[in-house]
Image (tube, helix red, strand yellow):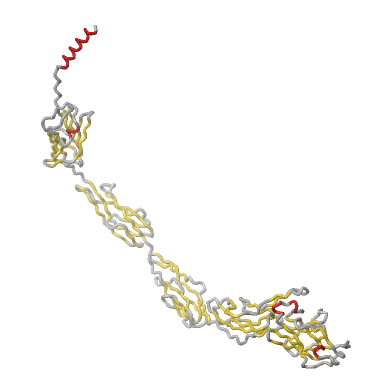
């Protein structure tokens, strides 16, 4: 059964295989766009052909062209297999009123291998140019500009038209309070500010141009202010004045300087440099060179040179309390300009200070100081010796003056009774004498016991008695034993005499090579030699 079926099938297949292939479909162009001999074709048109069967894209390359006479037209070719449409798109619009020829080459081939066989050419004519009146552009000549109030500016406008279009324009201003413009383009400045001036085509209001009209204020100087409030200088010295000028509209900001009294001070008219001539006060004026009605004034003080004569100042200090030892007074009140004076010790030294606290009396401070505000050297006695230095005086003008000083510091003596309860007398450097009994103490620089003095100070003190004035009748006792004084403390501790006679002695204090003798009366008392 199987063999019976196989033989007929084979015979059928052999019959079919021996049949000839059908002939391929002839390739042709079914439609063209634009059509052959078409007229008034838009210049932005594309050229397209539709094939009756699908073609091989590769065969279309370089076989679909467009030309104007012998001149090829640049473009791109695109083929859509689904619609079998090939399109040539020119790179640029075509020329008006021009004949173009499209060509599809004979080598174009279908997928079945059929060729076009011969070039297919057709021509068409583009549309003629239609000229319509129009305004191409509006341009105001000259651009932005500036005016002063009441000034005018005539503007010109360049209007480009086509085919006889009207070249007229309409002028407008964005702000008539700043600047106006008439129908002829004449701009009139009204007030400071900025306004936009516009020219618009009356034929085509989409065409316009604008410029900015800036109205500047009229030149003027509104104020002159001298910068220095309280200027001062000295006789022969200088001070430079400056002024701030408020100006608008580009007005000149310079000033001219003038002095009301050249005998007191002169001023350079251009630079404002004031030169002092004599002590006093002078008014200096700065006047606007643009507007002489605007000015400012300032009073300049001219001071005499700062100087002192020191011959009248005391230089020796000997009292326990020192006030106004050197009083540095300012110059005469008739010489202005100094302002507040300051004083400074610029060389040398004042006596060093020290503090004594004896445990019984309140602490005492001994120093001499310079008051920087008054120039007074004051205080209380301290270290003995000679102290020299320089006090520099400075005024507000910047002048300085130096005063030299020499202060001789001395010691102050007081005598206390033997109980130390009351001061009997104060001794200065005179010949005054007082009665002293054995056991009385000598006060040095306000200290009733030298043991309480600073060690470096007390170590330089040596007390002794001078027996040269009178000798007591000591009944065989040597004079040195009649009355004794502690050499370091200055304490009279022993006295021998036959009776209560008075004898004159000198109390000698030596300090660092210098000595001072104070005369004293010593009262003896009955004393029996053991």
Residue 226: x percent and y percent?
Answer: 47, 71
Residue 226 visible from this viewpoint: yes
Tell me the quarter of the image containing the C terminus. Answer: bottom right
488 on left or right of 93: right
Task: Name the one closer to the observer, 528 or 116.
Answer: 528
90 on left or right of 445: left
In the rendered view, tell whether residue 346 sits above or below residue 107: below
447 on left or right of 340: right
Residue 523: x percent and y percent?
Answer: 83, 88
Q: Residue at x 82, y 85 (%)?
A: 494
364 on left or right of 6: right
Residue 148: x percent and y percent?
Answer: 35, 62
Residue 272: x percent and y percent?
Answer: 44, 75
Numbered marks: total: 0
Residue 87 occupies quadrant: top left
Q: Residue at x 81, y 91 (%)?
A: 479
Residue 506 occupies quadrant: bottom right
């Amino acid at each position: 059964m199987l063999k019976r079926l196989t033989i007929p099938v084979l015979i059928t297949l052999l019959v079919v295989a021996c049949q000839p292939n059908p002939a391929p479909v002839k390739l042709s162009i079914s439609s063209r766009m634009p059509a052959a001999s078409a007229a008034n074709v838009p210049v932005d048109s594309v050229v397209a052909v539709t094939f009756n069967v699908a073609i091989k894209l590769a065969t279309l390359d370089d076989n679909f062209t467009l030309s104007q006479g012998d001149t090829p037209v640049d473009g791109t070719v695109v083929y859509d297999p689904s619609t079998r449409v090939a399109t040539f798109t020119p790179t640029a619009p075509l020329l008006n009123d021009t004949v173009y020829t499209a060509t599809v080459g004979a080598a174009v081939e279908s997928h079945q291998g059929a060729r076009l066989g011969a070039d297919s050419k057709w021509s068409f004519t583009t549309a003629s140019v239609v000229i319509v009146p129009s305004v191409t552009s509006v341009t105001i000549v000259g651009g932005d500009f500036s005016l002063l109030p009441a000034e005018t500016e005539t503007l010109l406008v360049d209007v480009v038209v086509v085919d006889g279009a009207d070249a007229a324009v309409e002028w407008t201003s964005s702000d008539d309070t700043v600047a106006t413009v008439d129908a002829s383009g004449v701009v009139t400045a009204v007030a400071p500010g900025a306004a936009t001036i516009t020219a618009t085509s009356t034929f085509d209001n989409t065409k316009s141009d604008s410029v900015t009209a800036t109205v500047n204020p009229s030149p003027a100087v509104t104020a002159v202010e001298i910068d220095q409030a309280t200027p001062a200088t000295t006789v022969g010295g200088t001070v430079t004045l400056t002024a701030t000028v408020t100006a608008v509209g580009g007005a000149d900001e310079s000033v001219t300087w003038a002095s009301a009294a050249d005998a007191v001070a002169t001023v350079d008219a251009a630079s404002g440099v004031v030169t002092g001539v004599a002590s006093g006060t002078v008014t200096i004026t700065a006047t606007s060179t643009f507007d002489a009605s605007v000015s400012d004034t300032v009073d300049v003080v001219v001071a005499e040179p700062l100087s002192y004569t020191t011959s009248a100042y005391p230089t020796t200090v000997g009292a326990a309390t020192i006030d106004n030892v050197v009083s540095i007074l300012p110059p005469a009140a008739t010489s202005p300009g100094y302002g507040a004076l300051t004083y400074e010790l610029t060389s040398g030294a004042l006596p060093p200070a020290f503090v004594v606290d004896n445990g019984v009396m309140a602490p005492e401070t001994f120093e001499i100081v310079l008051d920087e505000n008054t120039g007074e050297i004051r205080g209380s006695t301290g270290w003995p010796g000679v102290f020299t230095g320089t006090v520099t005086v400075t005024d507000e003008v910047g002048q300085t003056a130096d005063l030299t000083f020499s202060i001789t510091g001395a010691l102050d003596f007081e005598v206390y009774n033997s109980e130390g309860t009351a001061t009997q007398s104060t001794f200065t450097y005179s010949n005054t004498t007082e009665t002293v009994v054995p056991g009385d103490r000598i006060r040095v620089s306000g200290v009733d016991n030298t043991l309480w003095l600073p060690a470096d100070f007390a170590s330089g003190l040596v007390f002794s008695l001078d027996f040269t004035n009178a000798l007591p009748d000591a009944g065989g006792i040597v004079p040195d034993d009649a009355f004794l004084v502690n050499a370091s403390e200055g304490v009279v501790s022993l006295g021998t005499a036959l009776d209560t006679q008075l004898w004159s002695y000198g109390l000698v204090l030596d300090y660092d090579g210098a000595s001072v003798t104070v005369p004293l009366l010593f009262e003896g008392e009955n004393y029996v030699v053991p």
